Image: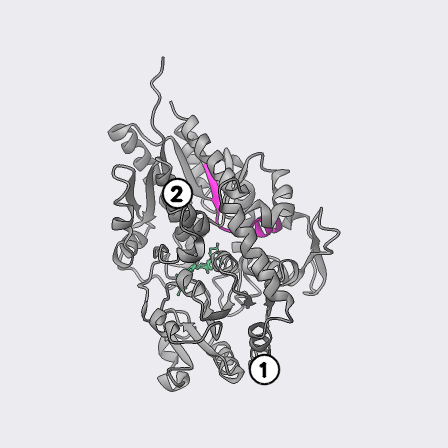
């Protein structure tokens, strides 16, 4: 009889913060389930993870189960990376030719040294890894870091009519007739309209993302960081094209639960490891400690979005004029024209009213009793973290999946206001007042309800919990 081999999974995220974040949490969850994981990054991000996070001590409790590997992104390590993670943004469309040969070598040398990988879980926008896995006879699973609603929108793109009217009803969702929910043209995933100022971001990036969405079907299964309980109508549509979909999110909530299942989540906020590529400034937690409950607006635009100086100043004045206190993440490189486009005078505000940091421990910030609302670019991680912490959102999406997410947050789940395409100071002031004031009562109720939905789905017997167990079973049973 053939000897049964222990599972060994290669996890390979796209080289950007929001992707590494989710897939690193998945790596931890698999290690907790006694599955051996090799986590593969580009050299550049590998070094940043080692520099800014406690990744090695975090995974030290899984001796023999976790290993880090890195691979070239085609440029020397000291080459400037204006987009933060790749030599330039368009490089994302050419990673195949740069990375495939290195990936093949890594797989073959691991096979030679230690028996090899039994499965590759690759980022769903790097489907060339599925082809490499097929060629070498290994199972592959695609992991996409976006919401099911956005995945559905990408799948629907080929059937949409061209049109100019941004407010036109562009996409309805089968099964959601009762909710009367639909996407306008301005809610669809995109790059060119939102990145008018950047010639690098064009419709070719959109075409690439659509193509990769369809290509993911070449893998044996699809993993999404979402839950059936939130996105069932979108997941049903995806399942008409993908025969096996694991909805195992929100991963950060599932991980909190599985790390210490006996501790209720509300008392478990200290267990939020830094998955980031920047050093966390934890001094903002001390600042939050001295603020009254639900008095602070948290402001962060994620890891990629870049704002113009005038957009940033409109947000700044809107917040100052609202009279509320705020904690603002001003990530290095997040201002077009460079960080030096600012003088400290632009940010002159008494310390008790405002705190500005370069990078915050976001999960802990959102879980803090002093935070009452979140001004966000509607990245999927930020959205999930906010919903799990029952913090209502003021959504100002920039690009990619964010316009879809802000629409769902504002119109379907009603846990925030979609401020898409507008950020003049009076709108910011009015929206902050509305959301901090409870959003007419309804928003407070919906945020509490959604947080409960999330809590249930990752608890034992919940839909995400069960889907994750099914994934583990598949990863273990496929091995001989
Ligand atoms: C982008 C997409 O918009 C997102 O939907 C996709 O899944 C990945 O690529 P990004 O712009 O980074 O991601 O936003 P988001 O998905 O919200 O991720 C940001 C992450 O950084 C969050 O997990 C957040 O907790 C973390 N973060 C952000 C910090 O830890 N500290 C900060 O100061 C800011």
**Which quarter of the image is occupied by the N terminus?**
top left
Q: Secondary structure at mark 2?
A: helix
Horizontal and vertical percent for residue 149? 60, 51
Q: Quadrant of residue 409?
A: bottom right
The residue drawn where x is 56% and y is 51% is: 453
Label 2: how many Cα within 10 Å (few below 14, some 14–19, many 20+)? many
Q: Splitting the image into four quadrants, where does ligand 1 fall? A: bottom left
Nearest the viewer among 230 and 10 is: 230
Residue 52 sits above or below residue 14 on the image: below
Nearest the viewer among 153 and 100 is: 153
Nearest the viewer among 317 and 285 is: 285
The residue drawn where x is 58% and y is 72% is: 435
Horizontal and vertical percent for residue 191? 54, 60
Q: Is residue 148 magenta?
A: yes
Q: In the displayed structure, does residue 156 sit left or right of residue 255? A: right
Q: Are marks 2 and 1 in contact (CB under 8 Å)?
A: no
Label at residue 160: none
Q: Residue furthest top?
A: 1
Residue 349 sits above or below residue 476 on the image: below
Label 1: how many Cα within 10 Å (few below 14, some 14–19, many 20+)? some
Mark 1 = which residue? 426
Image: magenta residue range: 141-155
Mark 2 = which residue? 29
* Separation of marks 2 and 1 at Cα, in angstroms: 44 Å
Q: In the displayed structure, does residue 279 sit left or right of residue 306? A: left
**Which quarter of the image is occupied by the C terminus?**
top left
Q: Is residue 172 magenta?
A: no
Nearest the viewer among 24 and 210 is: 24
Q: Nearer the viewer, mark 2 or mark 1?
A: 2
Q: In the displayed structure, does residue 452 sit left or right of residue 265? A: right
């Amino acid at each position: 009889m053939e000897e049964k081999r222990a599972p060994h999974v290669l996890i390979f995220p796209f080289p950007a913060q929001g992707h590494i974040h989710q897939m690193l949490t998945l790596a931890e969850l698999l290690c907790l389930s006694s599955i051996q994981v090799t986590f593969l990054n580009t050299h550049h991000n590998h070094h940043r993870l080692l520099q800014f996070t406690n990744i090695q001590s975090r995974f030290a409790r899984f001796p023999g189960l976790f290993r880090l590997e890195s691979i070239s992104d085609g440029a020397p390590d000291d080459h400037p990376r204006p987009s933060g993670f790749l030599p330039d943004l368009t490089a994302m469309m050419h990673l195949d030719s740069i990375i495939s040969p290195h990936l093949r070598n890594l797989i073959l040398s691991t096979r030679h040294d230690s028996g090899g990988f039994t499965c590759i879980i690759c980022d769903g926008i790097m489907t060339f890894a599925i082809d490499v896995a097929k060629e070498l006879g290994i199972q592959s699973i695609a992991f996409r870091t976006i919401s099911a609603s956005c995945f559905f929108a990408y799948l629907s793109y080929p059937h949409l009519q061209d049109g100019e009217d941004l407010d036109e009803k562009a996409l309805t969702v089968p099964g959601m007739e009762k909710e009367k929910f639909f996407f306008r043209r301005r809610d669809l995933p995109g790059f060119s309209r939102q990145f008018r100022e950047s010639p690098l971001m064009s419709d070719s990036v959109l075409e690439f993302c659509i193509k990769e969405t369809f290509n993911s079907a070449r893998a044996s299964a699809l993993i999404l960081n979402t839950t059936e309980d939130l996105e069932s109508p979108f997941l049903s549509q995806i399942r008409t094209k993908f025969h096996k979909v694991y909805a195992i999110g929100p991963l950060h909530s599932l991980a909190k639960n599985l790390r210490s299942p006996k501790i209720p989540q509300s008392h478990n906020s200290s267990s939020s490891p830094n998955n980031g590529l920047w050093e966390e400034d934890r001094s903002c937690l001390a600042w939050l400690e001295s603020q009254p409950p639900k008095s602070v607006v948290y402001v962060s635009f994620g890891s990629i979005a870049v704002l113009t100086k005038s957009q940033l100043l409109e947000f700044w004045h809107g917040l100052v004029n609202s009279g509320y206190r705020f904690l603002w993440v001003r990530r290095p490189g997040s201002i077009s024209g460079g960080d030096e486009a600012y003088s400290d005078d632009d940010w002159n505000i008494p310390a008790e009213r405002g705190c500005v940091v370069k990078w915050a421990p976001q999960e802990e910030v959102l879980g803090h009793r002093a935070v009452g609302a979140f001004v966000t670019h509607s990245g999927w991680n930020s959205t999930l973290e906010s919903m799990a912490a029952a913090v209502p959102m003021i959504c100002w999406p920039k690009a990619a999946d964010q316009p879809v997410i802000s629409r769902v947050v504002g119109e379907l789940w009603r846990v925030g206001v979609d401020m898409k395409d507008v950020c003049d100071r009076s709108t910011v002031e009015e929206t902050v007042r509305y959301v901090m004031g409870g959003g007419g009562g309804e928003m407070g109720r919906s945020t509490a309800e959604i947080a409960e939905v999330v809590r249930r789905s990752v608890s034992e017997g919940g839909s995400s919990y069960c889907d994750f167990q099914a994934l583990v079973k598949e990863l273990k049973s496929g091995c001989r």
